[in-house]
Image (cartoon, grey):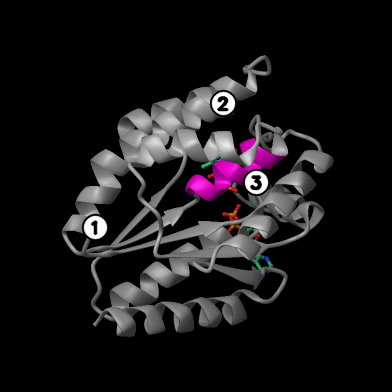
Amino acid sequence: MAGLFITFEGPDGAGKTTQLTLLAEALKASGYDVTVTREPGGTLISDRIRRIILDPDHQSMRAQTEVLLYAASRAQHVLEKIKPALAQGKIVLCDRFVDASIAYQGYGLGVGEEQVRMINQFATQGLVPHKTFLLDIAAEEGRRRLAERKQAEFKQGLDRIEQKDLAYHERVRRGFLRLAEQEDRIVLIDASQPVEVIHQQILREVRSLLQQKA
Ligand SMILES: Nc1ncnc2c1ncn2[C@@H]1O[C@H](COP(=O)(O)OP(=O)(O)O)[C@@H](O)[C@H]1O
Ligand SMILES: Cc1cn([C@H]2C[C@H](O)[C@@H](COP(=O)(O)OP(=O)(O)O)O2)c(=O)[nH]c1=O
C-alpha cells in the first residue's frame, strides 16, 4: 500500500499529542500531505463509541466489552479513514492504535496479549503501522502532566481510564515496554526529555523512513 502509517503510543500524559502535532507541522512545512487522527475516535461513529468507553458512569463495563468497543471503534476508523488516506499516498499520523489495546486491555486489565491481538487482527484487516513512537514515562509523571494540562484547559475530572489506579497504569507501561522489545517497528523514546529533543529524534527517524521509501 502507498502512503506511510505512523502511530504514537505511551501512557497517558507522555506527550503523544504534543509530538504528533509538531511532527505534522514539520512534515506539512516540507510539502507532505498529512492526515492527523486519533483513537479511540477519528470518525463520527468511532467518536460515539469513544464516548461510551470513557464515560465515568460506566464503571460496570466488563473487560470483554471494553476490548470489543475499542476494536469496533478502530475497525470503523481503519476502513473509513486510515486505509483510504494511505491509498491516496498520504502520511497518516495516529495518536494510539492496536498497541494501546495490547498494553491497556491485554496487560492493564489482564485480558492477555493473544486474545487482544486476535480481535484486532479482524478489526484492522491486519493493518500494521510502518513506524511507532513509544513515548515512555513513569505512570506517576504522566499523571502529573495530565493534571497540569487539564488545569490549563479548564477541564474538570479524569475519564474512566485515567481514573484507574497507579498500579494499573504501571502494568500498562510494562506492557508497552514488552512490545518495544518484541517489535522492530517500535522506537522507544525517553519521554522525560525536553519537547524539542524528542521532536528532533522523531523527525530524524521519519526523514530516514521517507528516504527509504523514495
Ligand atoms: N517532554 C515534555 N516535557 C514536559 N512536559 C511535556 C512534555 N511533553 C508534553 N508535555 C506536557 O505534558 C502535558 C501532556 O502532554 P500531551 O502531549 O497532551 O500528552 P498525551 O497526548 O500523551 O496524553 C501537556 O501539558 C504538555 O504540554
Ligand atoms: C486506543 C486505546 C486507548 N485506550 C485508552 C488510553 C487513554 O487512557 C484513553 C483515551 O485516550 P486519549 O484520551 O486519547 O488519551 P490521551 O489523552 O493520553 O491522548 O483510552 C485504551 O485503553 N485502549 C485502546 O485501544
Is the residue marked by circle 1 packed among few (<14), some (14-19), or many (20+) residues within 10 Å?
some
Using the rendered image of the protein, determine whether residue 188 is visible from the camera's viewpoint: yes
Q: Quadrant of ligand 2?
A: top right
Circle 2 residues within 10 Å: few <14, some 14–19, many ≥20: some
Mark toward the start of the polypeptide (2 vs 1): 2
**Magenta stretch: dominant secondary structure:** helix
Residue 3 in percent (x, y) is at: 25, 65
Three-letter amino acid code at disc 2? Glu
Q: Residue at x 71, y 33 (%)?
A: 110
Mark 2 to mark 1: distance in Å?
Answer: 28 Å
Q: Is residue 125 magenta?
A: no
N-terminal label among 2 and 3: 2
Q: Residue at x 46, y 70 (%)?
A: 22
Q: Disc 1 to disc 3, how far (Cα)?
A: 33 Å
Secondary element under disc 2, as helix, strand or loop, is helix
First in sequence: mark 1 vs mark 3: 1
Instruction: Report if residue 55 is visible in the image.
Output: no
At a point 34% along the width and 75% down the height, the residue shown is 27
- 184 is higher (above) or lower (below) than 120: below
Magenta-tinted stretch: 97-107
Image: 22 above or below 83: below
Pointer 1 residue? 86
Mark 2 CB near ligand 2 (8 Å cut): yes
Residue 66 is marked as 2
Q: Nearer the viewer, residue 36 or 60?
A: 60
- Secondary structure beneath label 1: helix
Three-letter code, disc 1? Leu
Residue 73 screen position, x and y as percent: 41, 32
**Pointer 3 residue:** 150
The amino acid marked with disc number 3 is: Lys
CA distance for labels 2 and 3: 24 Å
- Some atom of ligand 2 lies within 8 Å of the CB belonging to the residue at label 1: no
